[in-house]
């Protein structure tokens, strides 16, 4: 079976967020985060997934998303898009492009955030393959790190 670049990106982007094990339900004491708490999780930070390389997203204060996929075969793909927060639900829309700038995949997931004690919980609300919709898990916050690890790299790639 031959896998196209579009399929490869789609698989990498779709599979990455759902690698966490579904816990099935939120703890009884779980409370939704506020929209401000959810924004603080993402804005000015980098979300990173590992799958056949590294996939990075960064979220700017003005509601923009920038993405970069460094594949193990040495290729790079980029994304731009937007993000929103409504109550405790974080959604983003990304348009992934190949190295020629051609749009090859659009991805638009939403995740609801909760806190139980010191533990953050995530629920896949939409935009993820149907078999993962509704999955509830911990560990998503571990994929988020301080700072923007995408913007400067994008400028360098475009200069090439």
Image (spheres, rainbow, N blue to C red):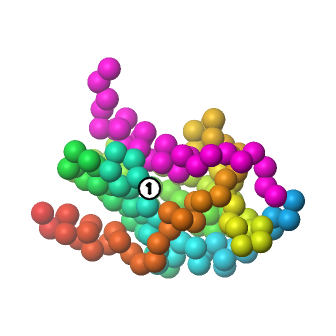
Identify which residue, 156 or 47, lies in the foreground.
47
Residue placed at 57% from the left, 39% from the top? 129
Q: What residue occupies the far right of the structure in this picture? A: 28
- Describe the element under mark 1 as helix, strand or loop: strand
Residue placed at 34% from the left, 69% from the top? 150
Q: Which residues are magenta?
A: 1-27
Q: Quadrant where the N terminus lies? A: top left
Q: What residue occupies the far left of the structure in this picture? A: 160
Q: What residue occupies the far top of the structure in this picture? A: 1
Q: How many marks?
A: 1
**Where is residue 93 shown, x and y percent of the image?**
50, 56
**Where is residue 49 shown, x and y percent of the image?**
44, 55
Q: In which image quadrant can residue 48 be found?
A: bottom left
Q: Which residue carries the number 1 mark?
A: 49
Identify which residue, 77 or 25, lies in the foreground.
25
**Residue 59 visible in the snapshot:** no
Q: Quadrant where the C terminus lies? A: bottom left
**Where is residue 21 shown, x and y percent of the image?**
62, 46
Identify which residue, 85 or 30, lies in the foreground.
30
Residue placed at 53% from the left, 59% from the top? 92
Residue placed at 39% from the left, 65% from the top? 66
**Residue 48 visible in the snapshot:** yes
């Amino acid at each position: 079976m031959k896998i196209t670049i579009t399929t490869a990106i789609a698989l990498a982007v779709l599979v990455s967020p759902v690698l966490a094990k579904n816990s099935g339900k939120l703890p009884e004491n779980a409370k939704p985060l506020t929209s401000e708490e959810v924004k603080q999780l993402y804005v000015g930070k980098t979300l990173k997934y590992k799958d056949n390389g590294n996939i990075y997203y960064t979220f700017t204060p003005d509601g923009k998303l920038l993405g970069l996929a460094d594949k193990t075969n040495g290729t790079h793909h980029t994304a731009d898009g937007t993000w929103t927060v409504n109550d405790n639900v974080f959604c983003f829309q990304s348009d992934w492009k190949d190295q020629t700038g051609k749009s090859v995949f659009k991805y638009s997931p939403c995740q609801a955030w909760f806190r139980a004690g010191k533990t953050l919980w995530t629920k896949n609300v939409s935009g993820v393959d149907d078999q993962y919709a509704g999955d509830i898990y911990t560990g998503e916050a571990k994929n988020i790190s301080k700072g923007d690890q995408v913007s400067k790299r994008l400028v360098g790639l475009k200069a090439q």
